[in-house]
Each structure stands twice: as structure tokens, then as C-alpha cells.
Image: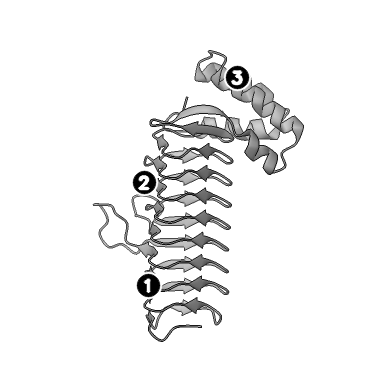
């Protein structure tokens, strides 16, 4: 399962059925779970923990030191969950001590070629990163979000669950859940109605979110005024409550 031309540090811990391609380098303090496949010419440095059944393609750089001038060699780490697809030339950096010291990737994510995930980012589950999407440091991306090709996300921004960022989006503020954005700077373009249908949201939930979107973006209310209206709606619909919770926690302002 391990090509003899691969270079693996003796302290790295690989499950018995991990497959490693030719000329791949795996450094010390790397832990890789069962069923994971690693192609040729990848580089994985630690401290890094990788779960089960992941696929990491050639020329990916996983667990490298953060691109942060304040980084001084501290033992920060990267944690990757299960069943992630990491394609060619993807770069994922470890965390920094200025944050929690860890970059986290959840489960079942689709990370296409040339994607960059910087230090201290937190990526949920079932997220799609199209080619060349890039996250600056300290970004959070929630479950089922989709980032189109060449999407750029400013540091400390958050992208809510089920949000859709069209190709070439330049994101400098938080993107609320369920919302479509595009442009640079990114602007709201509507509710991610097709995504909601595909993921089985009820008709009632979809209708409530359509009304919430109109309140937030088409009512000529200030953000605080809209939030008051949404808080009332949130008492009757869980998805609207999720939207309200995201807005209440935002720190950079929301795309509006």
C-alpha cells in the first residue's frame, strides 16, 4: 500500500491500509486514519491529524506552517475529518497561537484543485470549494456552503450554512446562511432556492426563508430593524432562527 519511493518519517502513524504514492513525503507527528489514499508527490507535515477514507491527490501541500509573519515555529496543528476529497495543488496550513492554534476541516468536503485554506480556518461538513477558491486566515465556512471558482474570502469572515458564492466573488463581510452572493465586492443576489430544494427543505421552511430574505434585503429596513422582525419569525421557524443567530454573531457586518 506504500510505494517504496515515498518518504515517511518513522514517527508518523498510518493505519495499516493507508495507501501512499511515489515520492510523497510525510513528516513527523502526522496521524492518518484507515482507508485514506494519498497520491504521488504530496507533502504532509505535522502536527496533523487526518481521519478515515480521505483522498489526497498529487502535489497537495497539507499541514504546512502558516503564512503569517507572527508565526515563530510554535507547534500548532491541522485537523481533518473523514471522507474529504483534496485535489491537486491544494494548500492547507496549520493554525497560529494568535487564534486557537488549529485549522479544522470537517467531513465529506469537496476541495478542488488549487484551493487555499489558510491558518486558523474552520470548515464544516459537505462544503464544496471550486477551483482556485481561497480563504484568508481565521475564516469560518459552515456546512453545505458552496464557493465558486476564484472566490476570495477576507480574513475573519464567516460564510453561513447553505450559502452560495458565485465564481469570482470577493467577500469582505459575512455571508448569511441560505443566501447567494456574487461580484467583487460580493452583493446579495437572492435566496439559494435550488440548494434548499436539493437538500430536502420543506415547503414551509422555504417559504419562511423567502420572507426572511425579503425582510432582510428588500424592506428598506436598517439591519437592526430587520433583525427585530426576523426574531419574531424565528420563533416559528428553525431555519429563520439559524439565520438570526448568524447575524447576531457577525463581527464584520454582513453582505448587504
Residue 63, can we see it? Answer: yes
Cβ atoms under marks 3 and 2 closer than 8 Å: no
Taking the image as shown, residue 162 lies to the left or right of residue 29, namely right
Residue holding disc 1: 41
Residue placed furthest toward the right: 203
Between circles 1 and 3, the one closer to the viewer is 1
Residue under the image location 41 percent in, 68 percent down: 58
Question: Residue 105 at x, y = what percent?
Answer: 50, 56
Residue placed furthest toward the top: 220
Cβ atoms under marks 2 and 1 closer than 8 Å: no
**Image vertical order of residue 201 relative to residue 46, above or below:** above
In the image, 124 versus 191, the foreground residue is 191
Q: Residues within 10 Å of mark 3 (few under 14, many from 20)?
A: some
Residue under the image location 75 percent in, 32 percent down: 203
Q: Residues within 10 Å of mark 1 (few under 14, many from 20)?
A: some
Question: Residue 115 at x, y = what percent?
Answer: 41, 53
Question: Residue 231 at x, y = what percent?
Answer: 63, 24
Between circles 2 and 1, the one closer to the viewer is 1
Residue holding disc 2: 136
In the image, 166 versus 49, the foreground residue is 166
Q: Secondary structure at mark 2?
A: loop
Disc 1 to disc 3, C-alpha distance: 51 Å
Which of marks 3 and 1 precedes in the sequence? 1
Which of marks 1 and 2 precedes in the sequence? 1
Residue 173 badge = none
Residue 215 badge = 3
**Image vertical order of residue 74 relative to residue 224, above or below:** below
Amino acid at each position: 500500500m506504500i510505494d517504496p519511493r515515498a518518504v515517511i518519517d518513522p514517527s508518523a502513524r498510518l493505519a495499516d491500509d493507508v495507501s501512499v504514492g511515489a515520492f510523497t513525503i510525510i513528516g513527523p507527528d502526522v496521524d492518518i486514519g484507515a482507508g485514506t489514499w494519498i497520491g504521488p508527490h504530496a507533502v504532509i507535515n505535522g502536527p496533523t491529524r487526518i481521519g478515515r477514507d480521505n483522498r489526497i491527490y498529487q502535489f497537495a501541500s497539507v499541514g504546512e506552517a502558516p503564512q503569517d509573519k507572527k508565526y515563530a515555529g510554535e507547534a500548532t496543528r491541522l485537523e481533518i475529518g473523514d471522507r474529504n476529497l483534496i485535489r491537486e495543488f491544494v494548500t492547507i496550513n496549520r493554525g497560529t497561537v494568535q487564534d486557537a492554534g488549529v485549522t479544522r476541516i470537517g467531513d465529506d468536503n469537496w476541495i478542488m484543485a488549487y484551493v487555499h485554506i489558510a491558518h486558523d480556518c474552520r470548515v464544516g461538513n459537505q462544503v464544496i470549494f471550486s477551483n482556485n477558491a481561497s480563504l484568508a486566515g481565521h475564516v469560518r465556512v459552515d456546512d453545505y456552503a458552496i464557493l465558486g471558482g476564484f472566490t476570495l474570502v477576507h480574513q475573519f469572515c464567516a460564510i453561513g450554512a447553505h450559502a452560495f458564492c458565485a465564481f469570482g466573488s470577493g467577500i469582505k463581510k459575512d455571508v448569511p446562511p441560505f443566501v447567494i452572493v456574487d461580484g467583487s465586492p460580493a452583493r446579495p443576489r437572492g435566496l439559494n432556492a435550488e440548494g434548499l430544494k436539493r437538500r430536502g427543505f420543506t415547503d414551509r421552511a422555504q417559504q419562511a426563508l423567502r420572507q426572511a430574505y425579503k425582510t432582510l434585503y428588500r424592506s428598506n429596513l436598517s439591519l437592526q430593524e430587520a433583525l427585530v422582525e426576523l426574531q419574531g419569525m424565528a420563533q416559528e421557524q428553525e431555519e429563520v432562527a439559524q439565520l438570526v443567530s448568524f447575524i447576531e454573531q457577525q463581527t464584520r457586518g454582513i453582505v448587504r
